[in-house]
Image (spheres, rainbow, N blue to C red):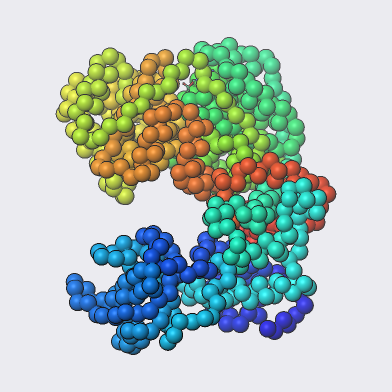
Amino acid sequence: MSIAPEKPLIDQPLSLLRGVGPKIEEKLNKIGLHNIQDLLFHLPLRYQDRTRVVPMGSLRAGDQAVVEGSIDLAEVSFGRRRMLLCHISDGTGSLILRFFHFSNAQKESLSRGSHIRCFGEIRLGKKTLEMIHPEYQRFSELPDIADEDALTPIYSTTDGVHQLKMRDLMQQALQRLSISQFALTEYVAENILSDNNLMDINKAVQILHYPPPDVSIDLLVQGRHPAQQRLVFEELLAHYLSLRQLRQKMQKHNAHALQNNHEQWQVFLSALDFSLTNAQQRVIKEIARDIEHAIPMMRLVQGDVGSGKTIVAAAAALMAITSGHQVALMAPTEILSEQHRQNFCQWLEPMGINVVWLSGRMKVKQRREALEKIAGGEANMVIGTHALFQDEVVFSQLALVIIDEQHRFGVHQRLALREKGNGMAPHQLIMTATPIPRTLAMTAYADLDVSVIDELPPGRKPVGTVVIPESRRSEVLVRVKHACSQGSQVYWVCTLIEESESLQCQAAAESADLLQQALPDCRVGLVHGRLKAEEKEQIMNRFKAGKIDLLVATTVIEVGVDVPNASLMIVENAERLGLSQLHQLRGRVGRGAKESNCVLIYQGRLSQMAKARLAAMRETNDGFIIAQRDLELRGPGEVLGTRQTGMVQMRIADIVRDQYLMPAVSMAAEEMLTRHESKVPHLIRRWLGDNIQYGQV
Ligand code: ADP
Ligand code: MG
């Protein structure tokens, strides 16, 4: 081994390894591996146990096993497909090896009487157990070379760097690691290691790439081996630190200190036709306490659908506006931004506050006027979609940015809004209806403070949910008819098979026609993504005003839409939707005093996952429980959506499985930041590598 420069592994290029030329190096770079340390942190995805030869008599279908025996017969069979069948036995039982692709030479070599060792998955064939295309070695007599002496790691690979190559490179890297001058530097402070019972980093890496045979493969599979937990802890710590650092940097900027105007606040409250829940009041206080400082607020408000987040946003806006500043409210869809415009106009305009809406449907002249009002400071409250980010939108006094249903926005968009504060950082208030468990929030939102609206307005009744097959559609129609005749309003959501949006919209239009025919007394409306913003707005307003009984819609109504008189929701092809999407949809009903219902119609046979989702919907209305279930079913990457996709792609930690470590990780992080700050960048670099989040802040 050429151990050229006396540099730490992080500075040793991959080309120092045998078998790595420029081409392979480039391929490794592409999967984020740039040096030998990176390679060592490319941890196995899973393991195979090839350390024991299993007697054929004790094999079961589904096992992955090494077997050894002698070849009894090798024959080419000409069925529907030509294939090579090799019969082997070991005295305890027998097995067929089946090859669909084979060469003549291969066939010749598998001759009767020779010995073979193979590895593969056992399947149940027609007559006996089989292995299809096993990995094998042939010997002229039974070998007495030792079996593999460690569990075999399986790595994620890349085009041109296959499993065996990766294993070979890893062996070379491990050899370097075992030389003391190249040992990995310990960045986690000594006392954190001992307090948390964490083993030495070098030992942990060694074990995970080369687990001795006495290591429990079950522990490894579950991710519970101490070597894994050691690295999991460090990885979570690195991610957490990167978010805390981001926060620290953000908070070095100056923000406007805002003050609550008690008089105006009373005017605002007395105009509402309800009183705030305790949870709403508490969260409003938390916000008020943040924004009275000249440090930018970074607060996330979590609240289940219907918990009344909008009024909390309005309260925050009022504080900023009565302090003489502007507020931007960003919604994920046009429909929702229009709804916010209506609410904010109703709440704030009587108080002399100027609300301006920026919408995609504005005529050039209108738009120019709106932009002028925003730039001139005449507009106090600006509402729109992500169009608010465009360069031509210039604010004069922006002090607060509110982002509704933030799981639809990327972090980068948030950063872009920050640019709009004319040198001052706006306070940020982010509202989400995807509640996540507290320990998970600690990981995912470590850069934010979190407030929870954990109470629904009084009088809400849980939405009764039924799941029924498509074949009972006629019963659903009866139900819809009945609801309409009672003066209730109904959503009919078409979630379609088609990938293309235009086909989806077309299919929704057809459903609307069919429903109108089947229910001639109902006033049927249709809303979908292909309509012009103006048309959407008209339809939604007519539905709100009770002039439409049955609103047929695509999932455009998923987020935020608020029509309290609607009390029945039908979702077609519900099996196609994710759990949080279903919960969002169902959240459109159950907002008024009426008893509400939701009918989930499914088509065909349900997969296990779909069954689990629909069962969860039937069993609970609680967004936190749904979110937890969703996490278990889909994993955090999907659930947290576009936010910080980098952050949830961890190498070894699983933020659901390893949630329980978070309290200890956050304590360790504070300790690292206060007492060992110089080690922090190294730790982050080790785990986040190229993906260091949102780079420059
Ligand atoms: P979400 O949290 O899903 O955004 P909204 O802000 O749309 O919820 O509020 C849902 C409905 O509840 C709205 O009709 C709103 O006016 C009403 N609401 C909000 N707060 C209260 C309250 N404290 N008491 C009664 N109704 C409320
Ligand atoms: Mg909302």
From the viewer's perspective, is residue 50 above or below residue 263? below
From the viewer's perspective, is residue 636 above or below residue 535? below
Look at the image and tell me whether residue 273 can be seen.
yes
Which residue is the extreme one toward the front? 91
Residue drawn at x 31%, y 31% is 467
| 47 left or right of 189 in image | left
Residue drawn at x 40%, y 62% is 58
Expressed as whole percent of the image width and height from the top left, the position of residue 400 reads 64, 34
State the image quarter where residue 471 is shown.
top left
State the image quarter where residue 139 is shown.
bottom left
From the viewer's perspective, is residue 63 above or below residue 19? above
Residue drawn at x 76%, y 55% is 188
Front residue (pair 585, 63): 63
Expressed as whole percent of the image width and height from the top left, the position of residue 246 reads 69, 48
| 373 left or right of 122 in image | right
Residue drawn at x 57%, y 36% is 437
Look at the image and tell me whether residue 252 can be seen.
no
Front residue (pair 76, 187): 76
Front residue (pair 105, 2): 105
From the viewer's perspective, is residue 125 above or below residue 549? below
| 299 left or right of 405 in image | right
Q: Which quadrant, please, contains the N terminus?
A: bottom right
